[in-house]
Image (cartoon, rainbow, N blue to C red):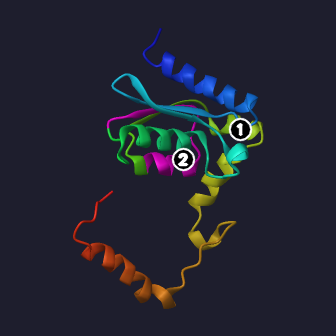
Amino acid sequence: MSEHEPFMKRAIALARQGVAGGHGGPFGAVIVRDGKIIGEGHNRVLSATDPTAHAEVTAIRNAAQNEGKFDLSGTEIYVNGLPCPMCMSAIFWARIGKVYYACAPEDAEKIGFDDHEFYRQLEKPPAQRATPAIQLTEFLDEARDSYQAWLERENRVTY
């Protein structure tokens, strides 16, 4: 048995559990620290009526709650499919050190998930995406004031 086997098998089991329960797509994730699972989750997009309730996000939320902190440095995540761009961003924000996965985006695309299209969209300049992002520069100074308020906050916690 490889060191990865129990964690990947658990991620796959969680994916199957989510599908069987009608919770969402076939995706599961576990977060591991020092050889122990500290958080896990499966896709709950349908059951939670939440488009962000992907397996990785639910596992990150579970691990952060279990650990009592938002910084998951020193951990690894096991997922049955390569995380979508949203989930990869959440993994970066959580400071997870490594991602192990089985299925590629092409595998997800074959069963109707468009992760690949999201990656393609993110390669384009913001204003040229299917959902364009348009900067309203007339509000720039006012918006920067909130950034300045953050910098001036004495007890701010950097993340």
Foreground residue among 58 and 103? 58
Residue occupying the point 62% across, 23% down: 13
CB of mark 1 within 8 Å of CB of mark 2?
no
Instruction: Determine whether, in the image, residue 107 is placed left or right of residue 72.
Output: right
Residue 81, numbered label: none
Measured from the top left, where is residue 53 in percent x and y?
61, 47
Element carrying mark 2 = helix
The residue furthest left is 154
Q: CA distance from mark 1 to mark 2?
A: 14 Å
Viewport quadrant of the C terminus: bottom left
Which residue of the protein is positioned furthest toward the bottom in this rendering? 138
Looking at the rendered structure, the secondary structure element under dot 1 is loop
Identity of the residue drawn at 29% across and 60% down: 158
Packing grade of label 2 (10 A; few <14, some 14-19, many >=20) is some
Which residue lies under the disc numbered 1?
Answer: 25
Q: Which residue is mark 2?
A: 87
Circle 1 Cα neighbour tier, 10 Å, few/some/many (<14 / 14–19 / ≥20): many
Residue 84 shown in magenta: yes
For image coordinates 51% across by 47% down, the residue present is 88
Image quadrant assignment for residue 21 = top right
The residue stretch that appears in magenta:
74-92
